[in-house]
Image (cartoon, rainbow, N blue to C red):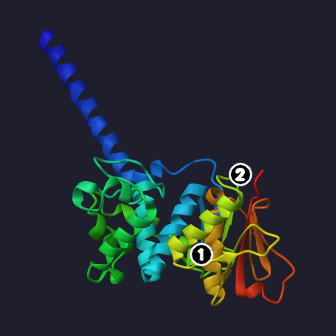
Amino acid sequence: MWVRTRTVVAGGVVLALLAVVVVVVLVRQLGSELRLPLAGRTCTVQADGRVVLDADQMANAATIAAIGAQQGMPERGVVVALATAYQESGLHNLPDGDRDSIGLFQQRPSQGWGDPTQLSDPRYAAKRFYAALKKVRGWERMRVTDAAQRVQRSAFPEAYQKWADESAVLTRALLGDATRAVACTVGRTPVMRGAAAAAALTRNLELDWGVVGRAAPAELTGLSLATADQRDGWRYAHWLVSHAQDHGVKRVRFGDLEWTARDGKWIEVAGSPQAGARVVAEVFADD
């Protein structure tokens, strides 16, 4: 009887351990799916497909795409980068992760990616990812997941592929290949307002895109950007809307279309002779 009891207990322990292992494996395989928010999603992207993100994810995606363009990456490279960040962090700039992994791409200081402070900067992390991707011979002809895996060397090399379609939609919108494709709803308490918001917006636009805006028209607090063409204009317009929550953006105007934080969507407005040549952004005024 005692032997049978011990056998039953041992069997139960083995089953429990197996259950734990299965759970751990599932968590690793699902990756960022478990971190994607189920509520509070405030940005919708429509560009030959539809993606819904929260404000934090949208801002990070916009920065990843802008840095890719600044680094001279083709659109395929931006798709790979976004799919990687989708899987690794759910497009959130995580303070930690598996072992010493940090940030959007869960890069590890112990593997030479940079120090923790550097890897916590989305721009630095994106630049390091693109630099590593450029070194992969023939990455442009690989599947998204294969190109990402050559950089990340994940234990789950197929995991990146499930984000390829969403990443392609985001890339088309954020690189200006779609009109009024990014629409975000901003909460009543933006992170910044007034002159501080306008200054931060100008500075971060320069860091992401390498372009400098000038002061907006006198009646507004914000910035104005010259555009080379429609694609150029929508790149900046979509970036501004993507960063609306964290930079206190109240209104974005390009051509005869305008996005407002109040409505959270693009609507047609009366045009002006110079409207198509510049993107104009207004931030919330100080209380």
Which of the pair 140/58 is nearer the observer?
A: 58
Front residue (pair 168, 179): 179
Distance from the alpha carbon under mark 2 to that under mark 1 = 22 Å
Say the numbered circle drawn on residue 187.
2
Number of numbered labels in the structure image: 2
The single residue placed furthest to the left in the displayed view is: 3
Front residue of this view, candidates 111 and 160: 111
Q: Is residue 211 above or below residue 207?
A: below
In the image, residue 148 above or below residue 32: below
Q: Amino acid at mark 2?
A: Gly
Q: Could you tell me which secondary element the residue under label 1 belongs to?
A: helix
Residue in the picture at 48% in, 79% down: 69
Q: Which mark is residue 81?
A: none
- Element type at marker 2? loop
Place of residue 215 in the rendered image (x, y in percent of width and height, measured from the top left)? 70, 74
Q: Residue at x 48, y 58 (%)?
A: 91
